[in-house]
Image: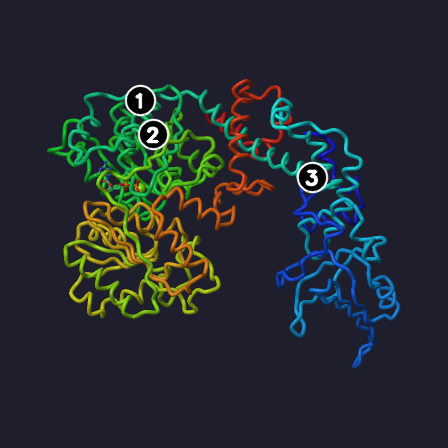
């Protein structure tokens, strides 16, 4: 990287300012401060709209002084200077307190009526109107005459993310000094790409973003810098992918007469076209001598598990093992149960009466009793277990495989890249990897978060299955709520089953939402004031609900010991429980085909994708599913809009898109990507979808021509800055 960018700030700007910048923004070098871009720009002729100041926040406004009144305080020594800034429509009060008369008079002299400047401070209120107490300010020269300001054709004023202790204009002064002396910089975006996309050089962009001559210039600079973020990220992901393609892996070609064939012969349904096509694609990947890295994303209920199981059986047929990594114990246990059931005697390897080709399916979780765990470890290490299913426990050091050929990561969004790598490292040669997402994800998220993977998509539900019909029930009407319990009872009495999902567990040691439920929607206007429904209370209440009399009720939540959870899930799966009151531990993956009703209490507490997941838990067998979203949220609120969206739309990809629009970017990229996330400054995954796609295309071209990027040292440096030396580690491990 350019030496200039690495120069400590205090060598270029005053030591005091450099220190303050380090203290408040954590920035140390010239390069770091230059990448601290303005949040927006103000124009001298355009005063800030004072009607929309956020209470309690630090703001910087551009305003004109309209009134100044100074006086001595009545009851104690000192002075008050009351200044009004604003325009005819709206004013903001600035109140200065001074002890010394000299200070008071100096301010009074500076803040003359008609002067225009930036004022900054925390928005408070006094006697019903907004005010800033002892704000800091930066006045412009001239402009005391209204015509003068309006006609001043001047450069936009950059407004930086700032805070108490460091004002926007102080940052602006510092960046101005830096860009004034800035030498040409090494260029991360290759010239040919820049020419093709009409992007200015980096040097010019940094000058223009901090000290633009016009808004148009600032906009162009921002476009270029935003593109650069997308391009460097895509180059990083694609280089990672290219490096992986060079690694050796053991080919696992499909055997026509093995376990897979035996399994297919007894599959109780026909594969959908999508399942078949994706399956063929995976089979081709597995037969190659380089590791597969494929993302399988799909509509909720589209049948991803069978696709994964076929891949696992292919690998077992080829003499190796497959590991299936699930995000929760409930899911790991369910996979173990359902895969064992699907395989029947094909899973009874080594047992009397097992099929000739049979293998063994082993469960390994963190809370298993020691003997079970020892047996599982042994089966994995000896190779007796063809399929090992587990949670994070699979990643631990003591876990060894005889020959790990395939890693399937289910519901990937909860696992990070590092964890994928940990598991991959358990093979002597890199295993093939199949990642499955829990929910459909929008295209840009696939490109950014999973951009180093090949992707396959399952859009359709198995034929004959209708989407779960969904209704919003407002809790203020007792008749409707009574009807909810009646419907639940009707289904249960007809031999089917249902869920009642609550946002909380409840009980004495309730510490708020269940761990792992951090995507619950925080309090927002229009939601019910009482605490959201809790599993423990709801179970009590439903036990005495006349409509449900005689039905078998049980509960499931994260505070129960894992053996209990396992028992409850098995009983529910076996049809011995009619109604399961639960938290979102059942959100992802749970598959009980006989379940037809999903009641969600305080549904406004859940996000759009979460609700789509929840209703995807029912109607998976032959019978139609019914989702009842109960809410006390007031009509017209954001909460009710979310529920309406879920009611009307059944396309998970579209819902994921809407969800993304409503969420903060960080939530989308997920904790695992935190390193990347913090470096995305201007890029927004949804808004910049086209730009990300362009950047991906360009990066792919550049890497195709020069896989190691030998001709682009500045790009390599930028990638390293973005992803650390992860790329190198990866190559070493391979
Ligand atoms: P998801 O994609 O949400 O993980 P699952 O893999 O859990 O979905 O499958 C949902 C249900 O559909 C399961 O009960 C599964 O056995 C069933 N299923 C899968 N594929 C088919 C198919 N082709 N025809 C009918 N049912 C299927
Ligand atoms: Mg699933």
Cβ–Cβ under 8 Å for marks 1 and 3: no
Instruction: Name the residue that disc number 3 marks.
Output: 216
- Foreground pick, 327 / 586: 586
Upstream in the sequence, badge 1 or badge 3? 3
Quadrant of the snapshot with the N terminus = top right
Upstream in the sequence, badge 1 or badge 2? 1
Cβ–Cβ under 8 Å for marks 1 and 2: yes
Q: Secondary structure at mark 3?
A: helix
- Foreground pick, 501 / 23: 501
Q: Position of residue 661 (x, y in %)?
A: 48, 48
Mark 1, ligand 1, within 8 Å: the answer is: no
- Picture layout, residue 554 above or below residue 450: below
Instruction: Name the residue that disc number 1 marks.
Output: 252
Where ligand 2 lies, by image quadrant? top left
Question: With 460 as the anchor, is 36 left or right in this view?
Answer: right
Q: Position of residue 497 (x, y in %)?
A: 20, 54
Mark 2 to mark 3 CA distance (whole Å): 52 Å
- Picture layout, residue 287 above or below residue 554: above
Mark 1 to mark 3 CA distance (whole Å): 56 Å
Q: Position of residue 376 (x, y in %)?
A: 27, 39
For the residue carrying disc 3, how many other residues have a C-alpha within 10 Å: few (<14), some (14-19), or many (20+)? few
């Amino acid at each position: 990287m350019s030496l200039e960018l690495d120069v400590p700030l205090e060598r270029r700007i005053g030591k005091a300012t450099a220190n303050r910048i380090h203290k408040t923004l954590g920035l140390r070098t010239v390069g770091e401060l230059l990448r601290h871009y303005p949040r927006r720009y103000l124009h001298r002729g355009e005063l800030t709209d004072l009607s929309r100041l956020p209470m309690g926040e630090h703001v910087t406004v551009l305003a004109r002084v309209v009134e100044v009144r100074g006086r001595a305080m009545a009851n104690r020594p000192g002075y008050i200077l009351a200044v009004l800034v604003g325009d005819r429509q709206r004013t903001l009060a600035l109140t200065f307190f001074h002890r010394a008369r000299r200070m008071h008079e100096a301010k009074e002299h500076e803040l003359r009526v008609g002067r225009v400047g930036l004022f900054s401070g925390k928005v408070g209120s006094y006697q019903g109107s907004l005010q800033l107490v002892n704000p800091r300010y930066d006045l412009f020269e001239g402009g005391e005459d209204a015509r003068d300001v309006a006609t001043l054709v001047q450069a936009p004023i950059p407004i930086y993310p700032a805070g108490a202790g460091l004002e926007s204009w102080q940052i602006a002064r510092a960046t101005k000094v830096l860009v004034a002396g800035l030498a040409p910089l090494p260029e991360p975006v290759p010239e040919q790409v820049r020419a093709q996309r009409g992007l200015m050089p980096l040097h010019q962009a940094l000058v223009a973003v901090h000290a633009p001559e016009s808004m148009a210039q600032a906009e162009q600079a921002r476009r270029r810098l935003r593109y650069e973020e997308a391009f460097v990220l895509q180059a990083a992901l694609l280089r990672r992918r290219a490096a992986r393609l060079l690694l050796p892996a053991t080919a696992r070609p499909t055997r026509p007469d093995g376990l897979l064939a035996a399994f297919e012969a007894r599959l109780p349904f026909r594969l959908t076209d999508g399942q078949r096509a994706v399956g063929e694609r995976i089979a081709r990947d597995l037969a190659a001598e380089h590791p597969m890295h494929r993302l399988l994303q799909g509509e909720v209920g589209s049948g991803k598990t069978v696709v994964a199981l076929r891949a696992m059986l292919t690998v077992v047929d080829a003499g190796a093992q497959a590991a299936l990594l699930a995000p929760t114990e409930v899911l790991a246990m369910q996979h173990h149960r359902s895969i064992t059931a699907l395989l029947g005697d094909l899973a009874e390897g080594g047992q009397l009466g097992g099929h000739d080709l049979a293998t063994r399916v082993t469960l390994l979780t963190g809370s298993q009793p020691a003997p079970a765990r020892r047996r599982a470890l042994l089966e994995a290490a000896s190779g007796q277990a063809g399929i090992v299913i587990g949670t994070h426990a699979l990643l631990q050091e003591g876990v060894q495989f005889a020959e790990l050929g395939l890693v399937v990561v289910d519901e990937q969004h909860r696992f990070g890249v590092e964890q994928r790598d940990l598991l991959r490292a358990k093979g002597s040669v890199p295993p093939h990897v199949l990642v499955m997402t829990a929910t459909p994800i929008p295209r840009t998220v696939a490109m950014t978060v999973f951009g180093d993977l090949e992707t396959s998509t399952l859009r359709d539900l198995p034929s004959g299955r209708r989407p779960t019909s969904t209704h919003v029930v407002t809790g203020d009407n007792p008749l409707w709520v009574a009807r909810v319990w009646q419907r639940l009872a009707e289904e249960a009495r007809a031999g089917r089953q249902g869920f009642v999902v609550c946002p909380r567990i409840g009980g004495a040691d309730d510490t708020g939402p269940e761990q792992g439920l951090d995507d619950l929607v925080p309090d927002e206007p229009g939601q019910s004031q009482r605490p959201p429904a809790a599993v423990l209370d709801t179970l009590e209440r439903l036990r005495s609900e006349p409509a449900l009399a005689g039905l078998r009720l049980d509960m499931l939540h994260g505070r129960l010991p894992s053996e209990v959870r396992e028992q409850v899930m098995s009983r529910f799966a076996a049809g011995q429980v009619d109604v399961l009151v639960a938290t979102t531990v059942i959100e992802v993956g749970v598959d009980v085909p006989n379940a037809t009703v999903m009641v969600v209490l305080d549904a406004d507490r859940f996000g759009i994708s979460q609700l789509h997941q929840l209703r995807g838990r029912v109607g998976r067998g032959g019978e139609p599913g019914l989702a009842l979203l109960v809410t006390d949220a007031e009509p017209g609120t954001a909460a009710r809009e979310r529920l309406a969206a879920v009611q009307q739309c059944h396309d998970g990809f579209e819902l994921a898109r809407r969800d993304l629009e409503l969420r903060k970017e960080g939530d989308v990229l997920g904790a695992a990507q935190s390193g990347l996330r913090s470096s995305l400054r201007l890029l927004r995954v949804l808004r910049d979808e086209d730009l990300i796609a362009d950047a991906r295309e360009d990066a792919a071209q550049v890497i195709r021509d020069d896989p190691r990027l030998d001709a682009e040292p500045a790009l390599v440096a930028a990638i390293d800055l973005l992803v650390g030396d992860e790329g190198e580690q990866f190559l070493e491990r391979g």
